[in-house]
Image (cartoon, rainbow, N blue to C red):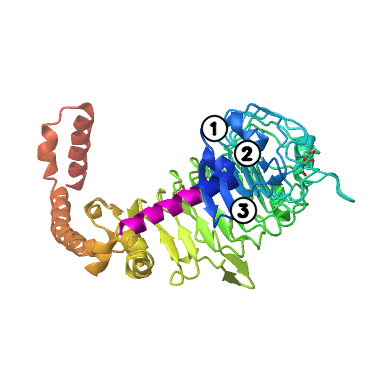
Amino acid sequence: MLRVVILAAFVCLAVGQSNNTKFPFCKLCKCETDDDVSANVTCTTDQRNYIFENSFWFNQSTNESYAYNALNFQNNQFLNLSYVFPKSNLTYLDLSNNAIYRISDGVFQNLQKMITLILSYNGLEMIHPDAFKGVYMEGMLMPLRSLKEIRLDHNKLHTLNQDLFEHCTDIEILDLSHNPIETIDHHTLLAIDSLPNLRELYLQYTEINTLPENMLHTPKYLRILDLSGNTRIDKIPNTLIQARSLEKFYLNNTGFVNLTEDNGFPEIPSLKTLHLCRNQHLSVIGQHSLSKLTGLEELRLSYNIDLSSIHPKALARSLNGGAVWPPIKKFYIEYNKIAYLDSDILSRWDTLSGLDIRENPWTCECENRWLIEDLLEYYLKIDEEGAKKVMCAAPIEMKSFSFYNLYEKKSHLRCLDLYGARPERDGPMLVGILAGVLIAIPAILFVFYAYHKRWFSICGICDNSPAAYSRRFYEQGASDDKL
Ligand SMILES: *[C@@H]1O[C@H](CO)[C@@H](O)[C@H](O)[C@H]1NC(C)=O
Ligand SMILES: *[C@@H]1O[C@H](CO)[C@@H](O)[C@H](O)[C@H]1NC(C)=O
Ligand SMILES: *[C@@H]1O[C@H](CO)[C@@H](O)[C@H](O)[C@H]1NC(C)=O
């Protein structure tokens, strides 16, 4: 037994040893190795003296590079990135959180296998195109030829050099979020539009209020666009109609008030997922505002604290006298201010695979009867726990009930009749009216009789006003005439 333990310990030590010689960064940093073939290294403490030390990158007697796959150098305070990284087959380089404000020319040129470069959370205000310069290649402009993903989020970029990506034109994922861009000026537009293979573009929290006209014409494979957190956006930018491949569009926390047919979505048949959440001022989703999204499968309209109304025809569009709906499979409207939901908003509720309607001030009356009698059954199958949490908020006597309570008790919600009255309250009311009529008829007859007999003039005597006097006088006269 002991021998086994010792052996195991020895093996471990040996592996540790070999890792340290095969991957010198593993001496200093956290390492994960993939069968000793390549290493993923994470150096998040201040190791900057070693990171820029050739002996950690290649064997100096053979010039052979160490087989790193991913290198994470966060929190190392580089400030000025001027070290030309030695030749390496790494595919992933993370330099986030290093206060980098300057990148020298060609520092990445020997990283020709690098697919992902992360420069998030730095102090970059300007980047020169030659920062991404690669090495000479026939017919190309010194490319960084494998680079597909570049993350420049959380920096201080206002604008991009129009040639910024001239050495890495194959970029598919560009993250510019959380930069104070404000307006996508002509240079920035040219830089973004120099990426014909762009698949994902992140522009959230960039203080922009729209996208320039025709911006989405060039990146014709764009699949994901995030414009969240730009509270000045209150209209869908016109260029969205050119996004022929867009599948996911995120518009959380923007400035929409009423989403209407005019400021709403143009035809984007490819769009499958739309997030419109945490829009503080959004109050109405109007008729046909979403109906041109004919391929929409997931609609997330959550945490819009003012959203009180979704038009029954928000999603449906008219076609040949009938109506057609997008094929929604996931429908999320939790944490809004919706009291009533029309069952015609979607065409099928029974085929949903995702649903959340919790935390809305639901009115538990006739108009929402279908929610309890029909929808809850499907809801329980999709998400039993969530379904049981939906509560009534009105009328006051229903406040303590959940939809599930009412569903279980099979209680029928009362319904208003055509005139807005409550039929079940009509019974007592009719009895009341009848009683009133029965009492009123003799009373009126009596009053007529009494008037005719002038019994009221007895009372007229106690009235001393001039009008009463003259009335008495004429009454007197009138009865004299009669005599
Ligand atoms: C390693 O590279 C250096 C610089 O390029 C060169 O001078 C040296 O001869 C190379 N050594 C071997 C063993 O190839
Ligand atoms: C939004 O719609 C509501 C109700 O239709 C309307 O009262 C309000 O004026 C609209 N607000 C804006 C900014 O269009
Ligand atoms: C949008 O907001 C919702 C609700 O907070 C969240 O679940 C979703 O992840 C957000 N979408 C994006 C892309 O941030």
Which disc number belongs to residue 56?
2
Question: In the rendered view, does 127 fall on the left or right side of 152?
Answer: right
Q: Residue at x 24, y 57 (%)?
A: 401
- Residue 6 inside the magenta-drawn segment: yes
| 212 vs 29, nearest the viewer | 29
Q: Position of residue 460 (x, y in %)?
A: 14, 36
Amino acid type at image mark 3: Glu
Residue 276 in view of the camera:
no
- Looking at the rendered image, the disc whose residue lies closer to the viewer, 2 or 1, is 2
Q: Position of residue 328 (x, y in %)?
A: 52, 65
- Looking at the rendered image, the disc whose residue lies closer to the viewer, 3 or 1, is 1
* Sequence-first disc among 3 and 2: 2
Which disc number belongs to residue 246?
none
Question: Whole-Å distance between the Cαs marked 3 and 2?
Answer: 60 Å
Question: In the rendered view, does 362 fall on the left or right side of 105?
Answer: left
Q: Which region of the structure is painted magenta?
A: 1-16
| 280 vs 85, nearest the viewer | 85
SS at mark 2 in the image? helix
Q: Main secondary structure of the magenta part?
A: helix
Question: Whole-Å distance between the Cαs marked 3 and 1?
Answer: 48 Å
Report the number of numbered marks.
Answer: 3
Above/below status of 267 relative to 232: below
- Residue 152 inside the magenta-drawn segment: no
Above/below status of 294 relative to 310: below
Residue marked by disc 3:
261
Residue marked by disc 1:
75
| 87 vs 442, nearest the viewer | 87
Amino acid type at image mark 2: Phe
- Looking at the rendered image, the disc whose residue lies closer to the viewer, 3 or 2, is 2
